[in-house]
């Protein structure tokens, strides 16, 4: 049927019609809030390039987690900012480490919320790489041993899900094996399977003090040109036992999310990263954009592309907006 018999505008005429034919809907259930944790008490230090985000000591962390849970956000992703860095990332698997204490604090006060823990070496090593440096190179196989040691330490402390972000080969299989051996076969792995080497991580590296001291991350993170390789990475992680496959960043990689949604049968997470957040906040501060509407449009686009869940620094703002919309 063609115009004038068919008129697309008919079904756009009223808000109730628009609601009836809406194909994608964002919900609080889709959101996961990343948070940065530090040692100490009563710390809430703003992260300059990520307005609204802070370095939080456990007491203040718990307050935000409570707020997130009361807004129906089902999970948080924790990143530890360590001032104790060494070549073997020992502070990452210290039973009294930053993340371990944060998990305990959250489980004491908001036990229902899902605590996801990012697992990586870069915030805990002197050189800031995601793997162990050996003779000037990132050594894959010793790195994954250490990474699974950190994962086990988080699981033992009560983490609900383990999220390795290092991009070493074979780490999902290694973590799965170590967790299973110690009785944590029920703890899922959200793998940062498809993590591109991206300039969009800039503000995070400032926040996490994890910029590599030499070179870059091109020998382990993916080349932004590649889409087929994303399918390969996801397929390998599924074979190794991943439960959720993540694509990161989100916005410049919606095609990748879409393709994976059609080719794999696991839930897909998308990470709306720090640079994506910082650009919106900068535009908002300049008074050039309506940030609230743009955030919702961006999150919707990530979901429409195929993401089943979205890690986003805008989770609280978005959840509040969704609450208002439903009133
Ligand atoms: C650590 C890690 C990074 C991010 C999540 N985990 C930084 C990186 O790989 O350089 C980026 C998150 C963001 O930019 O919001 N490996």
Image: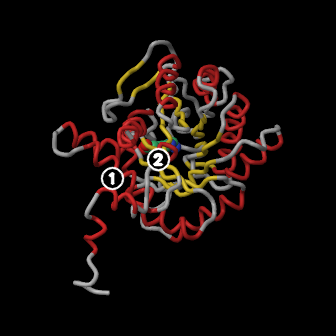
Chosen colour scheme = secondary structure
Q: Does the residue at mark 1 contact the one at mark 2 (Cβ under 8 Å)?
A: no
N-terminal label among 1 and 2: 2
Residue 251 in percent (x, y) is at 38, 56
The structure residue drawn at horizontal position 66% and vertical position 37%, both measured from the top left corner, is: 160
The structure residue drawn at horizontal position 57% and vertical position 67%, both measured from the top left corner, is: 231
Q: Is mark 1 within 8 Å of ligand 1?
A: no
Q: Quadrant of the C terminus?
A: top left
Relative height, residue 24 to residue 62 (above, below): below
Which type of secondary structure does the marked residue at label 1 adopt?
Answer: helix
Relative height, residue 194 to residue 283 (above, below): below
Is 10 on the left or on the right of 319, as rendered?
left
> Relative to the observer, which residue lies in front, 210 or 304?
304
Residue 96 in percent (x, y) is at 65, 20
Q: Which numbered circle lies on residue 208? A: none
> Relative to the observer, which residue lies in front, 267 or 226?
267
Q: Nearer the viewer, mark 1 or mark 2?
A: 2
Q: Is residue 173 visible?
A: yes
Residue under label 1: 297
Circle 2 Cα neighbour tier, 10 Å, few/some/many (<14 / 14–19 / ≥20): some
Residue 170 in percent (x, y) is at 68, 55
Is 283 on the left or on the right of 73, as rendered?
left
Residue under label 2: 27
Relative height, residue 70 to residue 217 (above, below): above
Q: Is residue 205 visible?
A: no
Q: Quadrant of residue 211?
A: top left
Residue 145 in percent (x, y) is at 71, 43
Q: Quadrant of the N terminus?
A: bottom left
**Separation (CA) of disc 1 from disc 2:** 13 Å
> Relative to the observer, which residue lies in front, 168 or 70?
70
The structure residue drawn at horizontal position 49% and vertical position 19%, both measured from the top left corner, is: 57
Q: Can you name the residue that lies furthest to the left here?
A: 287
């Amino acid at each position: 049927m063609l115009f004038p018999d068919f008129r697309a505008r008919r079904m756009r005429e009223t808000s109730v019609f628009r609601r009836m034919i809406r194909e994608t809907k964002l919900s609080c259930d889709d959101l996961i809030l990343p948070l940065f944790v530090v040692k100490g008490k009563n710390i809430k230090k703003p992260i300059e390039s990520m307005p609204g985000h802070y370095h939080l000591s456990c007491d203040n962390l718990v307050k935000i987690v409570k707020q997130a849970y009361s807004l129906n956000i089902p999970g948080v992703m924790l990143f530890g900012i360590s001032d104790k860095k060494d070549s073997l990332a020992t502070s990452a698997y210290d039973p009294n480490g930053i993340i371990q204490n944060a998990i305990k604090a959250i489980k004491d006060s908001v036990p229902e919320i899902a605590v996801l823990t990012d697992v990586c070496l870069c915030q805990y090593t002197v050189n800031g790489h995601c793997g162990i440096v050996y003779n000037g190179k990132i050594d894959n196989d010793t790195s994954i041993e250490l990474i699974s040691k950190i994962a086990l330490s988080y699981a033992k402390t009560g983490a609900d899900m383990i999220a390795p972000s290092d991009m070493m080969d074979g780490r999902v299989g290694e973590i799965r094996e170590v967790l299973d051996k110690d009785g944590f076969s029920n703890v899922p792995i959200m793998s940062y399977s498809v993590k591109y080497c991206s300039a969009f991580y800039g503000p995070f590296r400032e926040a996490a003090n994890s910029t590599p001291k030499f070179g870059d991350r091109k020998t382990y993170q993916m080349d932004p040109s590649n889409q087929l390789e994303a399918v390969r990475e996801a397929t390998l992680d599924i074979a190794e036992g991943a439960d959720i496959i993540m694509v990161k960043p989100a916005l410049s990689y919606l095609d990748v999310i879409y393709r994976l949604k059609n080719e794999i049968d696991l839930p897909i997470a998308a990470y709306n990263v720090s640079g994506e957040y910082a650009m919106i906040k900068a535009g908002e501060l300049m008074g050039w954009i309506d940030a609230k509407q743009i955030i919702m449009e961006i999150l919707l686009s990530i979901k429409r592309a195929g993401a089943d869940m979205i890690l986003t620094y805008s989770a609280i703002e978005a959840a509040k907006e969704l609450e208002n919309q439903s009133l």
